[in-house]
Amino acid sequence: MANQETQMLDDMISKGRRKMLGAGLTSLAGMLAGALAPSAQAAAFTDADILNFALNLEYLEANFYYLAAFGTTIDVATAASTAAGAPLIKLTGTVGTAGTVSGGSQVPFSTIEVSSYAIETAIEEGKHVQTLLTALGSSAVAQPAINLGTSFQTLATAANIPNGSAFSPYASDENFLVGAYVFEDVGVTAYHGAAQYLTVKANLQTAAGILAVEGYHAGLIRTTINYLDPTGATIAGYTNLISTLRATLSQAGLLGAAPGPYDANPDDYGLATFSVTLGANATTATRITDADPVNEIAFARNTTQVLNIVTGGGAVNGTAVVKPAVGVFFPAGMNAGPNGFN
Amino acid sequence: MDKLKKLIDGAFSRRKFVVGAGAAAGATAALTLTGCGGGSSSSPTPTPTPTPQFTDADVLNFALNLEYLEAQFYLYAATGTGLAPADISAGSSSSFQTVGTVTGGDAAAVPGLTPQQQEILNEIAYEERAHVRFLRSALGSAAVPMPDIDLSFFGPLATAAGITTATAPAFNPFASFDDFLIGGFIFEDVGVTAYSGAAPLISAAGVSLGYLTAAAGILAVEAYHAAYIRTSITGRAIAAGSATAYPYITIANQVEDLRAALTVGNSAPPSTAGSVETLLTLPTNLTTPSSIVAADPSTAVGFARTVNQVHHIVYGSATVGVSKGGFFPNGTNSIFATTTA
């Protein structure tokens, strides 16, 4: 049905999106150029490749929360996990190399606020694994090797958290929140970055729904840390250090491409307050939301950026992409199909 | 530049989804927007009915109406004043040109806040205003002006939810921090579901233009806000020890009951199969989960609402064919302003 006008429009879109600026509807794509490709080296990919990338992240998150809440991995039931209603996950994914989960132990929770949140999040991340396994069927990747022990000490040290080489997210309510903080905002940016590449509407709807849940989790963690440490003397202060590290790793993952509005440098903020002007008055605001400070739209990251964060810098060597990315949480790398992201 | 704009407008109108009866090619979008009604397969009548249609600009303008409402609420709560005139004006090419006003009711800066609570209100107010400005910037001359907004509707809404009686003092979300949390609760989960429902409506051209990514990013921020509100209510209830000691958790769930009833086409009670609402719970021991996240109980995937369902909620009416009411006493400035089944 294309006629001359639509052909001209297509031409303009493909040749130079910035030309659209100034039109009745402002093009955001020009500002986005270069920042949101799923992966610089990927020639072709499918919805399944994107969902499998998400599945690797969900394996990571779900096992962390199951270990913290119940003391077991997602494929092992305990009395506690069963009583709480946490699903027992059958590891039906077969693509790639199955690995084992190392490290982690049940947190000796002392407050209902934190324990109830941990249990809820475990259940929901477990269901995300289940949902993606079901959606992917025989295309689902296997659970890769996951390190949930020493990886936290490595990252805490890199983030300059005091006594980071001895940091354990399983030691206390407060430490658990810091461990959870490492993951949740990253999940938001990963789903946000991927949404536009999903071609099947149902997959987009599912991804948008999981994005929302990751946003709820991130908001929950950040709200609770803010309540427990309103002055930023301890764990709220650590969030700034972790966000700085994530932003640095994310920036390296851009490989020199110009950042877009959803991937500014930095593309991550901890809980330190910031200045805003409301009405005529300058005042201060919290940062429960991890978002671009001008437009207040959550950040988005491409797969290389996400990989570089969860592997502690394993995805990039100078200006070259390292594939598979290996390090910290994924000691043998993620599992991916032939054209997938790892 | 004018010629370019015409080309783009033309292309948008050509790529728009078709809504309503008899549009086989746009069946998915039609179902999403109109619920179960409007199927024409049983009708052999070939009479061509005018089909309502929409563009990406219409979808973004729908979101802008909601952001106007949220921004006004949070700005009044945080500072005692609302959006500035420059943030509510009409785009030159918008078919809506009348700039609305705010009926404030009890709208005022929430008293008695701790410094930490004030900083939270400042943050949300700032972020919702940023969303207004962002959408207006993206829409350019197509941006609709702010419609009339009635912030005194919280009182009747609370009565409809069974929170207050018609004879008792009206519910006032600006009276205290806890009342503010309920006011925010009324909006935030709805905002999440509205963006989730609208995201798939964006055309392929709109995806290329970055609209989907923008909408997804705002969706995430609405989820952060919703989590803040739900975590605060749950945490304060846990600290108080019971719903009797902290009745706001019960009030929030009454709001959910009302929202569920107003979600026309899917009005299952909250936390039941098919519902798009998740009730808050009050954990009283170290082995019970909370319910901060509003999501499907079997898949943990967040909910979506249609544009129509969102309109029913902000109008406070399950009636079909209503074009105004509730928070929008003269309707939204939107082609979706009239409710359907």
Image (cartoon, grey):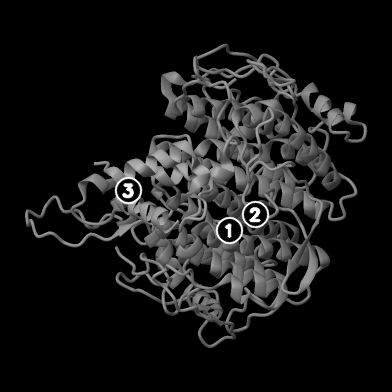
| Residue under the image location 63 percent in, 75 percent down | B84
- Secondary element at image label 2: loop
- Please identify, in this view, whether the residue under mark 2 or under mark 1 is nearer the observer: 1
Residue type indicated by callout 3: Arg
Label 2–label 1 contact, CB within 8 A: yes
Which residue in the structure is indicated by mark 3?
Answer: B15
Label 2–label 3 contact, CB within 8 A: no
- Callout 1: residue from which chain? B
- Secondary element at image label 3: helix
Q: Which quadrant holds residue A138?
A: top left
Which residue in the structure is indicated by mark 2?
Answer: A296
Which residue in the structure is indicated by mark 1?
Answer: B134
Q: Give A113 or A93, whichever is nearer the viewer.
A: A93
- Callout 2: residue from which chain? A
- Mark sitting earlier along the chain (1/3): 3
Q: How many marks?
A: 3
Distance between the alpha carbons at the discs numbered 1 and 3: 24 Å
- Callout 3: residue from which chain? B
| Residue under the image location 36 percent in, 43 percent down | A8
x, y percentage for residue A321? 66, 19
Residue B51 in the image: above or below residue B15: below
Q: Give B34 or A257, whichever is nearer the viewer.
A: A257
- Secondary element at image label 1: helix
Residue type indicated by callout 1: Phe
Q: Which quadrant holds residue A120?
A: top right
Q: Residues within 10 Å of mark 1 (few under 14, many from 20)?
A: some
Marks 2 & 3 on one chain: no
